[in-house]
Image: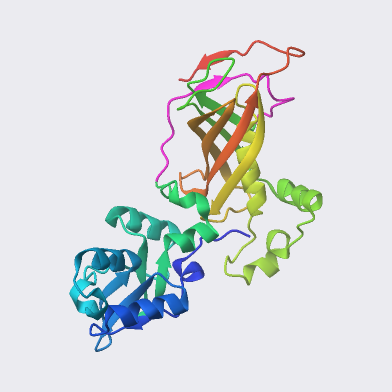
Amino acid sequence: MAFPIRVTDVMSSPVETASPGTTASDAASRCHAASIGSLVVVEDGAVVGIVTSDDFVVLLGEAPDPEERSLSEFMSTDVVSIDASATLGDAVERMFEHDIARLVVFDGDELAGLVSTDDVVRHVPQILQRREIGGYERQAARYHRQQETAYEKDDWTVEGTGFDDRRVNVGDRVEFSKTITERDVETFATASGDTNRLHLDDEYASQTRFGRRIVHGTLIGGLISAALARLPGVTIYISQDLSFLKPAGLGDRLTAVCEVVEDLGRNKYQLTTDVVDADGDGLIEGQAAVLIDEAPETGRVTVEAIASS
């Protein structure tokens, strides 16, 4: 089952609050007792500021008698907030935009909690290294007859940019596309043991939040593995992080898009690993580390590159 992660799913709640007149000493003691790094400052029911551990450090370094200073004297009044229904990707974008580590969360007009980079790391660690993907634009590409795979099917499309025949480099990109059929879903259910009726029973699925049958999230993620298998050489997974942004339905044509973003040395590489639908909307966003060995000489064939039209 795949569905976007919302701020409400990961935020810290209830949020600890204090009044503007609270002393720094009392505020610090409360933070220590609750093992938290910030307090939201509230006056007459309205949020007027926020105090973080960084603010306490600055106060200690600059102010005489810092423990007696009130929060109103050193709190941050430019409070950046987000709605609890927003996606976690939206929250990270806002943190990047304002160069901050936490957001005040509202549910409508009500203070609902705080979401921080620590909350994000606990749930979706790779999202801090990547922005949530927006509209996807297909790039000019070359088609390859593959030497790394045992066979290809007519319905499958493989495109790549930047590859030489022996190794990959930062900036190289591979795409693998196929249509997800009912047979794919049924076969995957049997092979994996995931026979959740959400994927297999129309009537049952129609009564869920999706209103229809959807494709297994891990089956969609498997397209990433298919794309990686078409990199030059023998590609071996080291790690993979995924965020599920949107479900796919039976009959959808999906494309896994993998791009080499860092050479880690000793034949190891970091890649972005996304899956998009036919409209370019993101279904999965991820990041992977792989080890790529040279292809064995046995069975080596010449790769033929054909310029795209």
| 254 is within the stretch colored magenta | no
Quarter of the picture containing the C terminus is top left
- Left or right? Give the position of 76 relative to 229: left
- State whether residue 157 appears in this view: yes
Q: Write down the quadrant of residue 99 in the picture.
A: bottom left
Rendered location of residue 273, percent (x, y) = 53, 40
Q: Is residue 15 above or below residue 267?
A: below
- The residue lying toward the viewer, choosing from 273 and 120, is 120
Rendered location of residue 212, percent (x, y) = 61, 63
Q: Residue at x 59, y 58 (%)?
A: 2
Q: How is the image coloured?
A: rainbow
Q: Residue at x 62, y 46 (%)?
A: 221
Region in magenta: 135-154
Furthest residue in direction front, as rendered: 65
Q: Is the magenta region chiefly helix, strand or loop?
A: loop
| 139 is within the stretch colored magenta | yes
- State whether residue 80 appears in this view: no
Rendered location of residue 276, percent (x, y) = 51, 44
Q: Write down the quadrant of residue 153 in the picture.
A: top right
- Left or right? Give the position of 307 relative to 218: left
User: How many discs appear?
Assistant: 0
Q: Is residue 211 above or below residue 127?
A: below
Q: Residue at x 29, y 72 (%)?
A: 50
Quarter of the picture containing the N terminus is bottom right
Q: Is residue 268 above or below residue 51?
A: above
- The residue lying toward the viewer, choosing from 165 and 198, is 165
Q: Write down the quadrant of residue 76 in the picture.
A: bottom left
Q: Residue at x 27, y 77 (%)?
A: 67
Rendered location of residue 159, percent (x, y) = 54, 27
